[in-house]
Amino acid sequence: MGNPTAFLNIPRKEAGYRPVHDRVNDYGEVEQTLNTEDRRLQASRCMECGVPFCHWSCPLGNRQPEWQDRLYKNDIKGAYELLTMTDDFPEFTGRVCPALCEKGCVLNKQHEAVTIRENEAAIVERAFAEGYVTSRPPKKRSGRRVAVIGSGPAGLACANQLNQKGHSVTVFEKNEAPGGLLRFGIPDFKLNKSIIDRRLNLLKEEGIEFRCGVKAGTDISIEDLLKDFDAVCLAMGAEVARDLNVEGRDLKGVHFALELLQQQNRVNAGVEISRENRISAKGKNVLVIGGGDTGSDCVGTAHRQGALSVTQIEIMPKPPVGDNPDTPWPYWPVVLKTSSSHLEGCDRRWLLDTRKFIADREGRVKEVEVEEVRWEKEPESGRMKLIHTGNTDVIKAELVLLAMGFTNPVAEGIIDALKVDKDARGNVCTDSSGQSSVKKVFAAGDVATGASLVVRCIASGRNAAKGIHAYLSSLNQD
């Protein structure tokens, strides 16, 4: 490395967030940026650790030490080329990835990990600004056509890799614009949609065709897909939200988290939503049920809509703060995570189970009854068992958002029509190459694995593309 002792002399420095009083009044990205010299110094902290656990922790196998060194030496072109050898969209992962690499960093043993994620975002932004990112269409076409169903991170990565191999790729997207959950699920304050459009424009220039507002199996038949394309990749995601089967679930004011998040992103994009269909937290006490990232996104969105108060509850115990002996380094630490949205104001409570929603006279939710629970390990099986204590409480809430995760793929009808094998959860069964039980049908991302991270979806899309390329190459040999 360029400065092998930097980690001893230079402390970790994060760019931090915009001030709360400023950022809650708009949907601009909350993260700030360091100046060029500070960013170089942060990159210099990457040490010669011998075994790069950052690389081991990354689903994409990113070569972090190599491009940290290029960044330190101000070789932005080289850093970007190294970064994009393994990551199709570093501008996405540099913003929304939970940075598994940083948790595996040797310096994280002292909670002083290299700022890998921020450095990644800085590299790609400078590469765009300095003109190193240009359209590179393939020089030769293979004559093979591939349909990719879904334009989230898995679908886009698969399409990009196949296009670069010279195959003609058409991406089908049921929504009005490409991006999947990147566009419609992740709030603008975490990922500005101009970042997605910038990359999409490049993909289009390189020859990928996008057909939006088209539902596979409806607007284009399964028969036509199989007839017109040499291979099909399913990348529809897993947006079927986990529900609550409790009294009052059908009350007005109780919504799935994605209903709020997708609608707000569309409003930000200029889509007109009628007053009667608009979900708004303005002047309301908001309850978010579910303690994950989607719940956190709801907290931040509720603040920007003008919520009176925001409470977030979780059925699981409160994670340890800082360190967890059950998940030691270099594994992903199961510890308390406090997001930028939480810092904007949120009453967080744990070990609460939702029992019922209580209505006002007009049939709208006004309160939610919850019950304290605890978890005990069963001696025989070792499994944790949920115990209801009987101690109840009532939380005032005029808007309730269910953010308890996702269960199934969004388009089971397509999966059934293709007659591919499914597992017990409805996910497409694939081999290690992403190929399903139907030879010309592959699957990538959440539709095959269940809900996961953007970085894992990109890795899955790249893997499926590799499998599809091998399959198409075998056809040429025949």
Image (cartoon, rainbow, N blue to C red):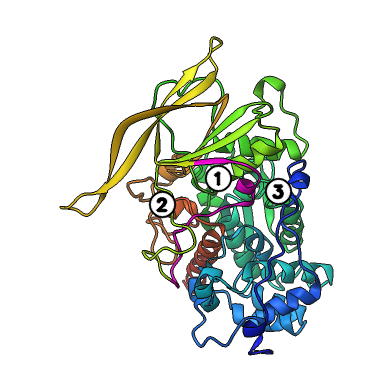
* The one of 51 and 108 positioned closer to us in this rendering: 108
Q: Position of residue 435 (x, y in %)?
A: 43, 61
Secondary structure of the residue carrying numbered label 3: loop
Sequence-wise, which precedes: disc 3 or disc 2? 3
Q: Amino acid at mark 1?
A: Thr
Q: Residue at x 59, y 85 (%)?
A: 47
Q: Is residue 282 left or right of residue 321?
A: right
* The one of 199 and 194 positioned closer to us in this rendering: 194
Sequence-wise, which precedes: disc 2 or disc 1? 1
Q: Is residue 164 visible?
A: yes
User: Where is 198 relative to 25, above or below?
Assistant: below
Cα distance between the residues tagged 2 and 1:
24 Å
Q: Amino acid at mark 3?
A: Phe
Secondary structure of the residue carrying numbered label 2: loop
Secondary structure of the residue carrying numbered label 1: helix
For the view shown, which residue lies furthest in the right direction? 130
* The one of 231 and 458 positioned closer to us in this rendering: 458
Q: Residue at x 55, y 17 (%)?
A: 364
Sequence-wise, which precedes: disc 1 or disc 3? 3
Q: Where is mark 3, residue-wise? A: 189
For the view shown, which residue lies furthest in the top direction? 361
Q: Position of residue 410 (x, y in %)?
A: 49, 41
Number of marks drawn: 3
For the view shown, which residue lies furthest in the left direction? 380
The magenta segment is: 329-348
Point out which mark residue 477 bears.
none
Q: Nearer the viewer, mark 2 or mark 1?
A: 1
Q: Where is mark 2, residue-wise? A: 428
Which quadrant holds residue 204? bottom right
Q: Where is mark 1, residue-wise? A: 294
User: Where is 216 relative to 86, above or below?
Assistant: above
